[in-house]
Structures are given as C-alpha cells and as structure tokens.
Image (tube, helix red, strand yellow):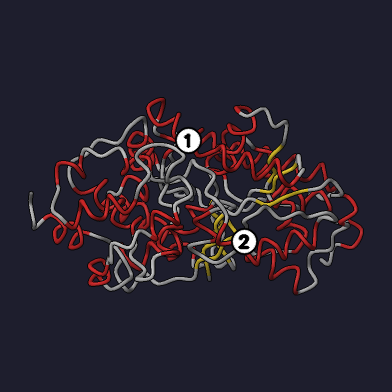
Amino acid sequence: MDHRFFDEVISKACTTSNRLDFYNCLSCGMCSAGCPYNGVHDHADPRKFIRQLALGMKEEVLNSTFIWACTQCGRCTMECPMGVEVLTLVRTVRGNFGLKAPGFLQDVVDNQIKTGNQMEVKNEEYLETLEWMEEELQAEVGDPNAKIPVDIEGADFLFLWDPREIKYYPNDVQSLAKIMWYVGASWTCSSRWWDATHYALFSGNDEESRIITQRYADEVKRLKVKELVITECGHATHANKWGPKVWLDKDNDYPVKSIIEKYVEWFEAGLLKVDKTKNTEPITLHDPCNSVRKQGLGDAMRYVLNKTVTNFIEMNPHGIHNYCCGGGGGLLAMGSDIYPYRMAKGKLKADQIKDTGCKLIACPCHNCFDQLTDIIKYYELGGKVVHLHHLISHALILEEKPF
C-alpha cells in the first residue's frame, strides 16, 4: 500500500475542475452502473479502479487492464452524484507513471511529434493531395475559382484536417471544400501543422500534448486568423477546445469550433441551401463521446441532420446517454491485445444500430467511423457509415449558391 499514491495522481492530473473534487467519491457504485461495459467484458469496473486508487493500491492500479480497456467516454462521471472525473484519473495514470501503452498508440503520438502528423504523410504529398482535390472540385462544380487555400493570412478561420482525409479518404477533402466554396467561406489550411488529431490525449503524456497544442496556437498567430476550426473528429474537437486551457499559457487564447458548429451557422445564415430529398434513406446517428458528452454538440448534429435528410431515426439511448463506439480512448490504436475488448464493447452499438432498422449511420468522427466500420464487418450488419459533410455536399443546390 502507498497511501500517497492517490494524492500523487491527483497532483499530476490536468483538469479544469477543482482537484479536491477527486476526493469526493462516495463509493456508491453509480460510476459502475453508468458504465455500459461493466459486465460486458472483464476489467470494466470504474468503482473498483477508484477504490484501488483511494486505498493506495499502486501496483494493482498500474498493472490493471482497466486503465487501457477504458474508452474514457465519460458516461460514468455523468452518473456520479459527485462528478468525479474517472476518465481524467485514467488518463493521468496512463501517462505519468512510466507505463507502456499497448499496441501502437505511442507510435502514433511519436509520429505526430516527429513529422507533424500521425500518419507520417510527407509535406509534399499533403500539398499535392490538396492540389489534386482542388482540381477535382473545380471539375465537379464547374468553377475554376473554387480553391483549397493554403497559408492565407487574415482568413476568418484556419481549418485542421484529419490525416485519414489526406491519406485514405481524399474525396472527403473535396466534399468539405465543396461546402466551404458553396458558402463563400474565408478559410485557409496550414502548410505546416495541419493534423487535428491528438492521440497524446489518450496516452496521457501532457508534455507531448503541450507540444502538439502549441503548434496549433502558433499557426493561429502566424496566419492571423480569427478562429480555429476542426474537421469532423470527436477527440480532436475536444482536445482543441479543452486542451489550451490546461496545456498552454494564458496568452494562447483563441476561439475553437467544430466544423459542425460552422454548418449550423451557415444554415442559420441562409448560406447552405440543400435538397434533403437527395438523402431519403433511413439514417441514424452515432453520438461521439468527445464531441457530444464532453463538448455538447449533440443538438448541432441533429439540427444538421434534420436540415439534410428526410428520415432520421434516433438510437436508443441517444444524445449524452448514447453508448461509446467502443474504440475511443486510444483503443483503436492498441492492437490485438485490446481488439477483443473493442468488439465486445461494439456489440452494444451493433444492437443499437440493428434496433433502428437503418443501414446508414451518420458519424461525425473519424475514430468512431473506423470503429463502427469494424463493428459492421464483425457483426455482419451490412451497413455504411457517413460523415455529415457527405450528406450536405451531396444535397447542395448548386443553382442557388449564394455567392
């Protein structure tokens, strides 16, 4: 027993909450009742983890599978009457006590620190992809002035991509750029630091998180933009909205929005004109934990869907009560050891999807997108996952473009 261990964990925690709140555990078990995976697979009991911390059971905590099997979804804290942030404690233990992450999680972080993006896309390839998709966009919309701008000083916002969009899904670049062309957005990409993802959020290494976040802050200053806008990615949205408050100095203060919030702004301003009859297939929505439970974007997602499709069917439960996809918290990058836990968690999501009767799932998060794709294949659901921008860009009424 090391009765100083809990104090040490709390002292190292990065949080915007009062640190004393971590001592408020009542041992009531509501966290375990709130965790949808408690009983689905072993090593899924947050109450046990909290009690081990409080009792100073250091070796048991550091050797626990729970700290890596936990997706840090935050559902347990939502049920906790005292608001104890279990996910913050999990993250702190992961990153501050010399533990080695399973799979290739740390490799992903190392890649981003070393090359600027987690998939080691060379800068030349990145810029060539943007040029290629700009040409495709111009051909699609018949406008030689349709641009994917890079390093434009004084634009309204700097847009950060997910490297999957650049490396594996370049048509997503075209789809997103089409929307911004349509509304006449004043925007730019960076030629330097463009990867919105932040797997150090999951590894728990705060120094690496600080390095990554400072790069974005420096680009905001260099390009003199008004705000930073993040692609459809849950953890990247949360890391960029919450992260500067805990990792950066106070002089690094800049507005951060999800592109989903921009969709809402553009719809409300009458700039996005769509024909929802182009999206008639029944569709349900997966609520990414990082952007819905932690950043409150659930209503914005539903606003966009109801503007864009004709037959939206909710999962049960949904919104802040929805289940995690099962691949969050870095689990998607933890390899074969954690894969069985991912698929066990995924059974809940598979059942949710089946119950809606939908074969189309809207998912405004790349991490969840990949996990849902794995779930669909593993449980033979025969469905398809799409982002919100796919629905919007497909339904745009080009003849009514406002600018």
Residue 358 position (above or below residue 322)? above
Residue that mark 2 sits on: 187
298 or 402, nearer to the observer: 298
Q: Amino acid at mark 2?
A: Trp
User: In the rendered image, which residue does mark 1 sit on?
Assistant: 342
Residue 280 on image: x %, y %: 87, 49
Q: Residue at x 37, y 65 (%)?
A: 244
Name the amino acid, label 1.
Answer: Arg
Check contact, mark 2 vs mark 1: CB within 8 A.
no
Number of residues whose C-alpha sits closer than 10 Å to that of mark 2, classed few (under 14), some (14–19) or many (20 or more): many
Which of discs 2 and 1 lies nearer the camera? The answer is 1
Position of 179 compared to 117: left or right? right
Is disc 2 placed on a helix, strand or loop? Answer: strand
Residue 38: x and y in percent read: 42, 46
Q: Quadrant of residue 24?
A: bottom left
Taking the spot 72% from the left edge, 47% from the top edge, the residue there is 175
Q: Nearer the viewer, residue 169 or 352?
A: 352
Pick the quarter of the image with the C terminus. bottom right
Q: Quadrant of residue 26?
A: bottom left
